[in-house]
């Protein structure tokens, strides 16, 4: 099997498991950490990202930093994932949410990830609860009142 076929099979299995146990994952008791471990980490691994630093790189050379640090205003914040090129150049952030969060509609998470991306001068960032993936343009300064679906 090719790498592409393996990735497809892995992601298909994740989707199938999510669908089979949908009501338990949508329950507010199913938390963000479990979502990350059960679905988001394996999803990005299937796409070829070194989520667990299997290569053993020092922080500056890792492809993915968990709980990265970014200065937002006068405070340090921690996006759930920072995806990077070797050498540390950030490409985008991913903010994870539990599946009971309505990613496409909720303003607060959208503002949160837009602020992270804007502050780090990244073009885009993502929010996901695995069920939904929302890609946000981070090239304009976010407003706390911006709708999640800002066009």
Image (cartoon, rainbow, N blue to C red):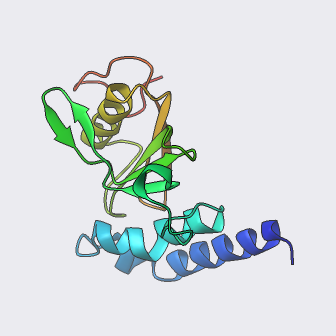
Q: Is residue 146 visible?
A: yes
Q: Residue at x 59, y 60 (%)?
A: 49
Q: Up-down: is 29 above or below 121?
A: below
x and y, in percent, of residue 92 in the image: 48, 40
Residue 70, image quadrant: top left
Q: Up-down: is 118 above or below 64?
A: above
Residue 55, image quadrant: bottom right
Q: Nearer the viewer, residue 59 or 19?
A: 59
Q: Residue at x 26, y 48 (%)?
A: 78
x and y, in percent, of residue 98 in the image: 33, 63
Q: Which residue is at the far front?
A: 58
Q: Residue at x 29, y 73 (%)?
A: 27
Q: Nearer the viewer, residue 4 or 67?
A: 67
Q: Nearer the viewer, residue 118 or 63?
A: 63
Screen quadrant of the N terminus? bottom right
Q: Is residue 147 visible?
A: no
x and y, in percent, of residue 97 in the image: 33, 57
Residue 97 placement, left or right of 83? left
């Amino acid at each position: 099997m090719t790498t592409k076929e393996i990735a497809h099979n892995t992601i298909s299995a994740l989707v199938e498991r999510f669908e089979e146990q949908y009501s338990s994952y949508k329950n507010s008791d199913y938390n963000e950490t479990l979502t990350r471990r059960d679905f988001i980490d394996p999803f990005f691994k299937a796409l070829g990202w070194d989520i667990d630093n299997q290569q053993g790189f020092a922080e500056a050379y890792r492809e993915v930093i968990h709980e990265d640090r970014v200065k937002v205003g006068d405070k340090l914040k921690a996006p759930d994932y920072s995806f990077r090129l070797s050498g540390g150049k950030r490409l985008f952030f991913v903010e994870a949410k539990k599946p009971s969060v309505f990613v496409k509609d909720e303003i607060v998470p959208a503002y949160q990830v837009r602020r992270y991306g804007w502050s780090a001068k990244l073009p885009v960032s993502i929010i996901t609860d695995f069920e939904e993936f929302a890609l946000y343009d981070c090239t304009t300064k976010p407003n706390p009142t911006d709708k999640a679906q800002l066009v």
